[in-house]
Image: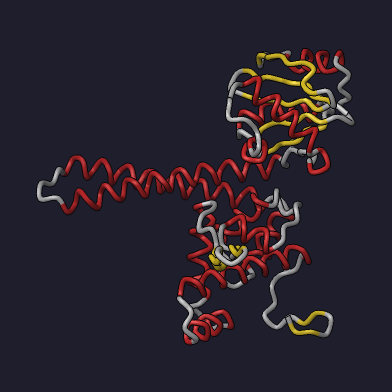
Amino acid sequence: MRVVGLDVSSDAFHACVYNAQGVVASRRFELHPHWQQEFAQWCARRGVQPQSDWVVVENTGVYSAQVCYPLHQAGFRVALVNAWQVRQGFRWSKTDVLDAARLAEYGYRFADTLRVWQPRAERVEQVHQRLVERLHYLSVVQQLEGVLCSLRLHPVRSEGVLARLEASVSSLRSQIALVEEEIRGLIAEEDRLREGCAIVRSVPGCGEVLSWWMLDLTDGFVRSVDGRTLSSYFGHAPHARLSGRRVRGGSHSRGYGPEEVRRVLHMGSLAAVRVRGELREYYRRKVGEGKRGLVVLNAVKNKMLRRVCACLRDWRRYEREYVGGGVAA
């Protein structure tokens, strides 16, 4: 078996071929219009079989996308891996050639864990790009509103500065509303996306924005996820830290993850425990037992995520009194 590691930059990439003897070849490729043919010929001369060997690419967002899509269309078996996976246990030296060799070695050693990369459906990618755009607008609005708040409290007021900042905030909010309407339009045009979002929204505490992010995380509701994995990814799952006699850290969530999804999920959990229902009763009972409010909210978020994943798995909307297999859910 041979593995080709690719370290991609904005206008070029380094490729290394790795087999049982180690690195056997390396080369830099410029991303000109005919790079795919040059790369395929170079791989063929070194015995790389596109259908059976791996091309391992470091996930660098847009940079990696500009090589993954053409290679997938050309029939190569592509795997997209995170940088932290590859760099654990390797040397600290860093060059483009060395990074490509690390990727190739990682692919060779962990070939049984690699997953074939598949491009997203075009509509899902369109939704993803608008979610990213919306996220950046929200971040800028938050920054500008913070500046506005501080300037309004200042003894010396500059009306011109305040007017320009207010106009910028208003313009950005208009852009956010436009982006959200485009997202709704894209989802409404495809039955599976529309129904998947409706399933997510049927779970108490889950709103429209969370359904959009679930669509993005599941590649249009085609990739299955379980509640525990998703909770860990969002930073809400408790992880034990116990070893021997001395390490007694207890179980704690890591407290960080995708910021916007964590914010939306937190607001949803607050809404869920304020309206009549079993989540509010659960929250009040646990707080009454002496649990901290935020700890109980964290458990509510885990409940919400598990219910969302279960409903998506069964492709059915949430039912408060659902009975399955003779046991009350």
**Position of residue 217 in the picture relative to residue 144 (left or right):** right
* Residue pictured at 47% horizontal, 87% vertical: 288
Its colouring scheme is secondary structure
**Position of residue 266 in the picture relative to residue 12 (left or right):** left
Residue 79, image quadrant: top right
* Residue pictured at 59% horizontal, 73% vertical: 204
Query: Height in image: 74 above or below 266?
Result: above
Task: Work out which residue is located at the far left of the displayed protein and give it.
Answer: 155
Residue 34, image quadrant: top right
From the image, which quarter does the N terminus lie in? top right
Q: Residue 289 at what x, y percent from top left?
A: 50, 86
From the image, which quarter does the C terminus lie in? bottom right
Query: Height in image: 41 above or below 170?
Result: above
Query: Height in image: 14 above or below 64?
Result: above
Query: Height in image: 315 above or below 180?
Result: below
* Residue pictured at 72% horizontal, 20% vertical: 15
**Position of residue 325 in the picture relative to residue 256 (left or right):** right
Task: Examine the rendering and report whether any part of residue 298 can be seen.
Answer: yes
Q: Residue 152 at what x, y percent from top left?
A: 19, 52
- Picture mark count: 0
Task: Examine the rendering and report whether any part of residue 237 can be seen.
Answer: no
Q: Residue 266 at what x, y percent from top left?
A: 50, 64
* Residue pictured at 61% horizontal, 45% vertical: 127
Residue 53, image quadrant: top right
